Image: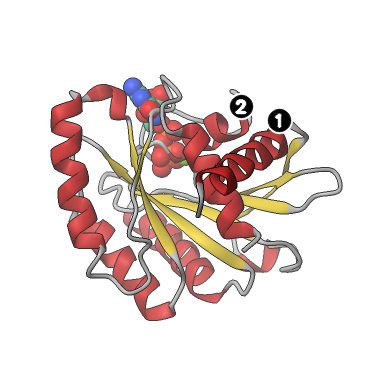
């Protein structure tokens, strides 16, 4: 992509998310999902990694998705419509790997997340969120393997970049990027972000638009 094309994409993305965004519904089970009639971008990642916060930062709306210090806040698929008329759906997912939650609850979330990720025809890209301080964990690798197998395109987004020094961020980024390059369905570029400082959010908006409308 040329610099001019990238600039146009960033502007298109800025405008889209400056326009209407509204909560559509919460789906505790797949059968509650609306028809697959719009491109969808899903936010996946370990519990507490910052999925809901990133959705809010992306859309520039603080209270849109519920966030919390307590892991396990998001327990259903929460769907948001972007644009009026809507042109895109964002899906905030329950976190995976939250060991302290009751076992049957963990199983239920895992089923919901896995079934959605494997079986949604309009799912254009999954953003796999990874905490900048921790890098990839075994559960992240499990989700990556599932997405590779289902041939669902995904991209790793590093979260909470404000919590570590730039030098440490560069080290983690390089490690995660090297591993991502070995995964067939993974986008080779990572996006480092902070929902706190908004670093990387404009790049993320552009990546979402590029993936949704490609
Ligand atoms: N410093 C900092 N804190 C963040 C950032 N993003 C999220 N947090 C904090 O991390 C905690 C978890 O954020 P959430 O957005 O609720 O995380 P989640 O991934 O949606 O969590 P679950 O729904 O429980 O899976 C909250 O206390 C947020 O304020 C960030 O970029 N920087
Ligand atoms: Mg959440």
Residue where numbered disc 1 is placed: 18
* Residue 69 visible: no
Q: Residue at x 44, y 27 (%)?
A: 195
Report x, y in % for residue 154. Answer: 42, 62
- Secondary structure at badge 1 equals helix
Is residue 51 found left or right of 121 in the rendered image?
left
Quadrant of ligand 1 in image: top left
Report x, y in % for residue 35. Answer: 76, 68
Q: Is residue 16 above or below residue 126?
A: above
Q: Quadrant of the C terminus?
A: bottom right
Instruction: Measure how far apart labels 1 and 2 are at the Cα level.
Output: 7 Å
Q: Are marks 1 and 2 in contact (CB under 8 Å)?
A: yes
Q: Nearer the viewer, mark 1 or mark 2?
A: 1
Q: Residue at x 59, y 71 (%)?
A: 120
Report x, y in % for residue 161. Answer: 30, 29
Crowding at mark 1 (Cα within 10 Å: few <14, some 14-19, many 20+) = some
Q: Is residue 90 above or below residue 205?
A: below
Q: Identify the disc placed on residue 60.
A: 2
Q: How many marks?
A: 2
* Residue 182 visible: yes
Q: Residue at x 51, y 44 (%)?
A: 3
Q: Identify the disc placed on residue 188.
A: none
Report x, y in % for residue 49. Answer: 34, 39
**Mark 1 vs ligand 1: CB under 8 Å?**
no
- Secondary structure at badge 2 equals loop
Q: Residue furthest top?
A: 197
Crowding at mark 2 (Cα within 10 Å: few <14, some 14-19, many 20+) = some
Precedes in sequence: disc 1 or disc 2: 1
Q: Residue at x 55, y 76 (%)?
A: 119
């Amino acid at each position: 992509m040329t610099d001019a094309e990238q600039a146009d994409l960033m502007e298109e993305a800025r405008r889209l998310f400056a326009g209407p965004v509204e909560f559509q519904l919460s789906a505790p089970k797949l059968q509650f999902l609306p028809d697959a009639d719009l491109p969808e971008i899903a936010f996946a990642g370990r519990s507490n990694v910052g999925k809901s916060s990133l959705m809010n930062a992306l859309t520039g709306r603080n209270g849109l998705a519920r966030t919390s210090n307590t892991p396990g806040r998001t327990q259903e698929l929460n769907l948001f419509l972007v644009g009026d008329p809507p042109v895109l759906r964002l899906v905030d997912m329950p976190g995976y790997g939250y060991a302290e939650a009751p076992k049957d609850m963990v199983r239920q979330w895992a089923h919901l997340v896995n079934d959605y990720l494997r079986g949604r025809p309009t799912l254009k890209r999954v953003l796999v969120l990874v905490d900048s301080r921790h890098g990839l964990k075994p559960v992240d690798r499990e989700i990556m393997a599932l997405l590779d197998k289902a041939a669902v395109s995904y991209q790793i987004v590093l979260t909470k970049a404000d919590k570590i020094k730039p030098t440490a961020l560069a080290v983690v980024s390089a490690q995660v990027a090297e591993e991502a390059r070995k995964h067939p369905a993974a986008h080779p570029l990572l996006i480092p972000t902070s929902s706190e400082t908004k670093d990387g959010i404009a790049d993320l908006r552009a990546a979402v638009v590029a993936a949704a409308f490609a």
